[in-house]
């Protein structure tokens, strides 16, 4: 498959008055055209920072290294005009909180039309017609174009956000925890809608979440993120059936099972690595029950264990070394 977005050894450091925050550390990842990829990890793992870096929206104070290529061209070296076309045009983003993603002083129709004008233009009548079509695509009748965000429920606002994101027919849609603020029933409706839209338009999807159930429902591949880097990657079925990294095993072990005998859920000991004070070697080693001496001093690389299944762990990299 042809690569759409390629992240190469991305590093992002935020500078504070007292210290440095190492948010992303040598992360490499690729998203192919038409692929749906899930990026999963605990809060503070660096998932949202990675998404913002893909749009070159990091604050100026952030120190970055590595590169991100969109269709072979560096996002970090694009001119402002190119970035305006990229953001919301080639790459669209759905934000986590539907209550703050929309401007309360403009109608939802006006906000969708703003995106259409910025990334396509056309006559006012055509733009209004297209805005109505987009609203109907996400299950909202077009007569509600004149309503304000405050007149919608949380789930309906998220649907409006999806409609606005789809206005420019993006090649890549980044969804940053799009169902966190919604109840379970509405979550299911939003996920089903996104799945249908992604398959219909063959756009690529980067789903950022801490919910493994969402990944299994929506994505073809999954990348497990810890302390700003990828520790396991592969096809969803392979990773979930045969998790290799102790952290991935812990995440799956913490999920309740609906079938089979009852058993106590397992918890991952300790806390996620402090990005201001990352441990040497493998960042997970202070929490790992299988930690070895090598883990405390040497960072493991991402190694192929089987086809389309990679892991960053000394327990396995030893086996594949020549």
Image: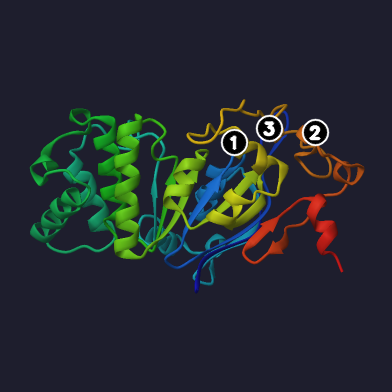
Q: Tags 3 and 1 in contact by the CB under 8 Å rule?
A: yes
Which of 53/281 is in front? Answer: 281
Q: Which mark is residue 240?
A: none
Among the two numbered marks 2 and 3 on one chain, the one whose residue lies closer to the N terminus: 3
Say which residue appears at 37% left-offset and 63% top-offset: 203
Which of 201/108 is in front? Answer: 201
Q: Is residue 187 left or right of residue 19?
A: left
Q: Is residue 164 left or right of residue 242?
A: left
Q: Quadrant of residue 119?
A: bottom left
Q: Position of residue 18 (x, y in %)?
A: 72, 28
Q: Quadrant of residue 290?
A: top right
Identify whether 111 is placed above or below 203: above
Among the two numbered marks 2 and 1 on one chain, the one whose residue lies closer to the N terminus: 1
Say which residue appears at 46% left-offset and 63% top-offset: 35
Q: Is residue 297 left or right of residue 107?
A: right
Identify whether 109 is placed above or below 85: above
User: From where the camera sits, is residue 119 visible?
Assistant: yes
Query: Secondary structure beneath disc 1?
Result: loop
Identify whether 70 is placed above or below 57: below
Neighbourhood count class around disc 3 (C-alpha, 10 Å): few under 14, some 14–19, many 20 upward: some
Which residue is the site of mark 1? Answer: 42
Q: Tags 2 and 3 in contact by the CB under 8 Å rule?
A: no
Q: Is residue 184 left or right of residue 290?
A: left
The answer for how far apart the CA atoms under marks 2 and 1 are is 16 Å
On-image quarter of the C terminus: bottom right
Which residue is the site of mark 2? Answer: 286
Q: Which mark is residue 272?
A: 3
Q: Position of residue 316 (x, y in %)?
A: 79, 55
């Amino acid at each position: 498959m042809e690569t759409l977005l390629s992240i190469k050894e991305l590093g992002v450091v935020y500078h504070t008055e007292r210290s440095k925050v190492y948010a992303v550390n040598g992360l490499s990842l690729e998203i192919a055209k038409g692929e749906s990829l899930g990026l999963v990890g605990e809060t503070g793992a660096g998932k949202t920072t990675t998404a913002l870096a893909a749009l070159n929206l990091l604050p100026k104070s952030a120190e970055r290294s590595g590169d991100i290529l969109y269709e072979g061209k560096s996002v970090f070296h694009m001119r402002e005009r190119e970035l305006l076309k990229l953001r919301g045009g080639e790459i669209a983003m759905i934000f986590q909180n539907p209550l703050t993603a929309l401007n309360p002083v403009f109608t939802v129709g006006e906000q969708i039309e703003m995106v259409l004008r910025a990334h396509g233009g056309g006559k006012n009548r055509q733009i209004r017609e297209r805005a109505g079509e987009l609203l109907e695509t996400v299950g909202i009748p077009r007569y509600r174009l004149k309503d304000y965000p405050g007149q919608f429920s949380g789930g309906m606002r998220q649907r409006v956000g999806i409609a606005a994101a789809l206005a420019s027919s993006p090649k890549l849609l980044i969804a940053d925890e799009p169902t966190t603020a919604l109840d379970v029933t509405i979550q299911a409706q939003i996920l089903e809608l996104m799945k249908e839209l992604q398959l219909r338009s063959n756009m690529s999807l980067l789903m950022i979440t801490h919910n493994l159930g969402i990944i299994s429902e929506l994505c073809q591949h999954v990348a497990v993120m810890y302390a700003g880097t990828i520790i396991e990657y592969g096809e969803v079925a392979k990773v979930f059936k045969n998790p290799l990294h102790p952290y991935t095993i812990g995440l799956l072990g913490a999920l309740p099972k609906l079938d089979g005998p009852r058993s106590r859920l397992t918890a991952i000991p300790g806390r996620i690595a402090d990005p201001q004070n990352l441990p040497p070697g493998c960042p997970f080693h202070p929490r790992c029950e299988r930690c070895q001496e090598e883990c405390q001093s040497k960072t493991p690389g991402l190694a192929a264990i089987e086809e389309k299944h990679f892991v960053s762990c000394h327990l396995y990299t030893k086996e594949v070394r020549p």
